Amino acid sequence: MSNAEWGPLAGLIGTWEGNKGLDVSFHNEDGKVGETGYFERTTFKPFGPVANGLQELYGLDYRTAAWRHGEENDNPFHTEVGYWLYDAANNQVMRCFMVPRGSVIIAGGTAAADATSFTMSANLGVLSYGILSNQYLDENAKTTKYDCTISIDGETFTYDETTVYEHYRSKEPIMHTDRNTMSLVSRDA
């Protein structure tokens, strides 16, 4: 089997690291939006096909962890687990993931099989490509929108993602952004 079945996700297979991460988010301890630089490691392991009736998906099981600069030997300040999926018949890319704060996002978008850049989005209150949170977050930091743009260029890829949420300590919606440039460490996932 070639990697062609994974379409635009094929270039992500492997282990990646990036030390140029920038997290711009609300810092509860400071009561305001602040910036945090970080190091990140992500692994994408291929699987598939997965048959959903007539739909056939190829996917990447992924795990990511991020450490604030200077804290790389400590517990990560952010982790995610989930799947990236490709539906060739419908030119759909999807990212299904959970963060350990009790939030789940299924984001999706359109991408041709040979695309090297694509965007996936999710919105609160929709049945396809949506957002769910635990009760506390829904009442105090409700996520309403998520967008993520990926660009793959050989042995590097970049992402730029924005999560919009309504925080009880802010009158305006907060734009929580994360971006990083990742370099390939190994194609062995």
Image (cartoon, grey):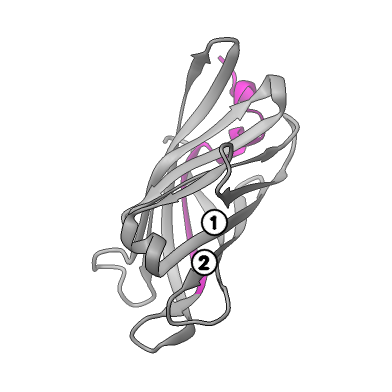
Q: Which residue is mark 2?
A: 165
Residue 63 in sight in this render: no
Which residue does the image show at 61% across and 38% down from the upper left?
11
Q: Position of residue 62 (x, y in %)?
A: 42, 41
Q: Of 108 and 182, which appears nearest the observer?
A: 108
Q: Which residue is mark 1?
A: 182
Q: Which residues are magenta?
A: 1-24
The quadrant the C terminus occupies is top left
Q: Position of residue 27 (x, y in %)?
A: 41, 81
Look at discs 1 and 2 and give the one toward the viewer: 2
SS under mark 2: strand
1 or 2: tag closer to the N-terminus = 2
Left or right placement of residue 78 versus residue 12 in this view: left
Which residue does the image show at 54% across and 54% down from the upper left?
183
Left or right placement of residue 103 versus residue 181 in this view: left
- Say if the magenta span includes residue 2: yes
Which residue does the image show at 67% across and 23% down from the upper left?
88
Residue 105 in sight in this render: yes
